[in-house]
Amino acid sequence: MQTEHTGLKRHLKVRHIRLMALGSTIGVGLFLGSASAIQIAGPSILLGYLLAGLVAFIVLRTLGEMAVHEPVAGSFAAYANSYVGPLAGYMVGWGYWTYWIVVGIAEVTAVGIYMGIWFPETPQWIWALSSIVMMGLINLIAVKVFGEFEFWFALIKVVAIVAMIALGGSVILFGFTNDWQPIGLSNLWQHGGFFPNGTNGMLLSLQMVLFAYVGIEMIGLSAGEAEDPQKTIPMAIDSLAWRILIFYMGAILVILAIFPWNQVGQQGSPFVVMFERLGLREAAGLINFVVITAALSSCNAGIFSGGRLLYSLSSNGYAPKSFSKLSKYGVPHRAVMSTVGVCMTGVVLNYFMPDKAFQYMMAAVTFIGLMVWVAILITQIQFRRSLSKSQVAQLAYRAPWWPYTSWFALAFIALVVVLMGFHEDARIALIVGPCLMGVYLMMFYVVGLHRKTASKRDFK
């Protein structure tokens, strides 16, 4: 296992890691993207969230196995470099950096949409610009400060979702705000049944559902700055299973039980609309604040991840050397500032295409994120094959039912990628994503990195 000092500070505590892992999945995919998924699948979206959640947990456990064994800053990019090859490490590193750039743009676009509810006259790009600048400044301070901000950002949205589930449950079971007439669960099978658009509707919604979960793998990037990663990483990963079940399944179940599925998402975030229709307009305003916080949280995490990836790529000669410079607080400030600078393209997108910006970003980020998941699964398979039986037995944290779970997850992701071709809004991702990967592949050979003779295991 690598233990050399990288210059990064191990100041992220277990509470930071737990909330970062959970917070990274609670963003626009749940608060805004869920509306589009519900329109396609109806109540059967619950089955989609369950299946996608299972695959997400498998990916996280396979990554956790490697992260606990070898806690380094480059995480899965480092592991791909070590166990698959330099080209794989290069492609995963730059691909995932691009992913977080797109996430940052998507999240600040969501901020602009949410702020438009309160300030409809203010251009959407103003809020996008303000969000990027604010999150960039937070990331330039010590990692402990970033951890605290992300902890409270995540805690706000977690508490809000729990409160929403509790309130919705009281409406369903006891009829609160409905003259004490329980609503029940009949909306789940009325209005066309549980599969109103057939199984095809549920299948076509899977790419949107997976978008909600993509991001949990950033927990691996925190391993290089976590206190006692052998303890904190497994605790954070294992707690995600039941938390995802509660927050995603519980929240969507409440919304679908209270409102007919074909009325959800016609007026913005279904979370905000739910409180408005229950006569709790003040609470709806609070939820709007929460979803803005959720988007800022994901943007914050994106800048953090992008900066660490550039730092890791630079340390190994895969990016300009200046990105490996650290501030006196142990922050890769040049890598962070460069990440923020590229995120500024989102401001331009919001200026020229405010109506389509979120839709395009959501499609593009899903494809890139899924390719990173594929890389994690393949790398872990190669990692296991590199170990002897005795070494496998000594692993402190192992992925369950290997290799069957890994192959199941790969097959599921392949199915989703194929299904993206049948969805008009997602089809653009199958064009943009491969083209971007082709550019990085060309860069790898043009700059001569294919002739790199350093050992595969020097990736930090």
Image (cartoon, rainbow, N blue to C red):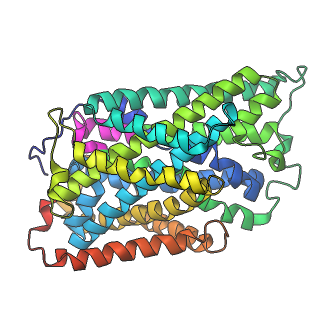
- Decide: is 397 above or below 202: above
Residue 15 falls inside the magenta stretch = no
Q: Position of residue 278 (x, y in %)?
A: 81, 27
Image x and y of residue 443, in percent: 27, 74
> What residue do we see at 35% from left, 61% from top?
376
| Position in image of residue 63 (x %, y %) | 34, 54
Please name the residue shown 60% across and 70% down the image.
420
- Residue sitting at x 84%, y 21%: 177
Query: Looking at the figure, which quarter contains the C terminus?
Result: bottom left
Q: Answer with left or right where residue 397 lies relative to residue 213.
A: left
Q: Quarter of the image holding residue 206?
A: bottom right
Q: Is residue 118 visible?
A: yes
- Between 81 and 395, the residue placed more toward the observer is 81
306 up-or-down from 92: above or below: above
Q: Is residue 227 magenta?
A: yes
Q: Tell me the magenta residue range.
A: 222-238
**Residue 451 falls in which quadrant of the image?**
bottom left
Residue nearest the observer in this picture, 384 or 34: 34
Classified by dominant secondary structure, the portion drawn in magenta counts as helix
Residue occupying image coordinates x 61% and y 74%: 421
257 to the left or right of 451: right
Q: How many marks?
A: 0
63 vs 159, nearest the viewer? 159
